[in-house]
Amino acid sequence: MNKAPLILISNDDGIHAKGLKELTEVMRLFGEVLVIAPEVPMSGMSGAITVDKPLRAVKVEEEDGYTSYKCNGTPVDCVKLGFNQLTDRPPNFVVSGINHGANSSVSVVYSGTMGAAIEGCLHGVPSIGFSLCDYASDADFSKAKMIAARIFQSIFEQGLPLFTCLNVNIPKGNVNGVKLCRQTKGKWMEEFEKRTDPHSRDYFWLSGYFKNFEPEVEDTDLFALENQMASIVPINVDMTCFETLEQMKNWKF
Amino acid sequence: MNKAPLILISNDDGIHAKGLKELTEVMRLFGEVLVIAPEVPMSGMSGAITVDKPLRAVKVEEEDGYTSYKCNGTPVDCVKLGFNQLTDRPPNFVVSGINHGANSSVSVVYSGTMGAAIEGCLHGVPSIGFSLCDYASDADFSKAKMIAARIFQSIFEQGLPLFTCLNVNIPKGNVNGVKLCRQTKGKWMEEFEKRTDPHSRDYFWLSGYFKNFEPEVEDTDLFALENQMASIVPINVDMTCFETLEQMKNWKF
């Protein structure tokens, strides 16, 4: 019987992404690895699940302590399949990434990488989403791998509170340490570019820029990243706003 | 100049869903209505956005105080287009639904209906997702409409704290009032049905049942629904878990 912990890895850049291979390399130092990743890129898929078509998972690689599958579903589908079907024992950890591109601030809401990490902690195991602030498909993950190993080592030893996962973002270039942060308040602005096709019909490309509502505030993830530090934001899957709940107790409906 | 508030409506069941028409009827009592809904059903799409293909929005109906569009994107794409492109003034409210089927407890993480409401409050306006606990396409929305009107009236007058939206679920059948709640802790179990196709290849259908981890606890949304009350859960788009953040301050990384 294999006593090594089973680490489930997924991502949203898909089975062929460099960041997935790099994270797998790191995680094989800690235990048995089961990779289940989308067969095509699934960026921006958030916590989406596939309800209207059957899922398939095809084994890609298998060697001692390591198995990988590609799946036609979303990152969350991949994690669900990992817990329910593709292994005879439940995974002990879920890690997602390393994403090509940042998932800081409110991007946690849209990120498929974080969707997979959130799904992991809904299954009751310590889960982390890792992202590198570099969209390039051949990005240099060498520093990100060291940070991922360091943070995973800590969670491996100390665990995480139930129904909490970590959103880890790593700056491009130098990394001057690791910082615990909260999610930066901000929003995406002017989000579309409007064009007209050769048949005179309008279409829109998602685009725009992010506006930080609190650029000077030091305990946010964006502040850490702008100062070349890796950010760790603990994420709560209980989305209840207890402050508002208290306020609303006096309201009439 | 039109002084009536502009109410943006979307959903995840798509432009043809009965629940969308019923919600539109209610909202036209309160102001000018702009409907932008997916052209096909998008259940389970969570906060997904479309990054890899252009979006199109086609006008379906237009009359005094009411315009509707169908869009080839997700519920969140619909809301983003509504704020950025399809109107000359920013919407004052976003309402989503009325969903065919519950979005209580952790389903808030997967729901496209709630994805649209969360997107609305990321744009800084009071936003509500409404769901009826009845999946039937011809469900009876008469009581749900009254509840939606009652809750919207309250938010219309009192607003909502910034970056908070409401997840409203309405039971099927009798409704014995409205209750402020928190998100029930629980998880989906045995989530897939495995089958084999005529070519001997396995495939999986998402399935399973929900396990309530706190069935006797009275302040949860599922408890309210089981007692035939409509549940209101205030949802926080800042997903930072501040409790864990405090605990982790002593950790070594």
Image (cartoon, coloured by chain):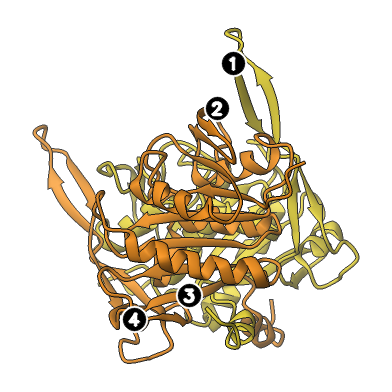
Chain colours: A yellow, B orange
Q: Which of marks 3 and 2 is in front?
A: 3
Q: Are marks 4 and 3 on the same chain?
A: yes
Q: Where is mark 1, residue-wise?
A: A201
Closer to the N terminus: mark 4 or mark 2?
A: 2
| Left or right of B74 on screen, residue A19 | right
Q: Where is mark 3, residue-wise?
A: B232
The residue drawn where x is 64% and y is 72% is: B240
Q: Where is mark 2, residue-wise?
A: B56
| Left or right of A149 on screen, residue B226 | left
Crowding near the residue tagged with mark 3, few <14, some 14–19, many ≥20 C-alpha atoms within 10 Å: many
Q: Which of marks 4 and 2 is in front?
A: 4
Disc number at residue B176?
A: 4
Q: Is residue A153 above or below residue B202?
A: below
The residue drawn where x is 30% and y is 79% is: B228
User: Disc 4 sits on a residue from what chain?
Assistant: B
Closer to the N terminus: mark 4 or mark 3?
A: 4
Where residue B227 appears, as percent x and y from the top left, is 30, 83
Q: Are marks 1 and 2 on the same chain?
A: no
| Left or right of A65 on screen, residue A144 | right
User: Disc 3 sits on a residue from what chain?
Assistant: B
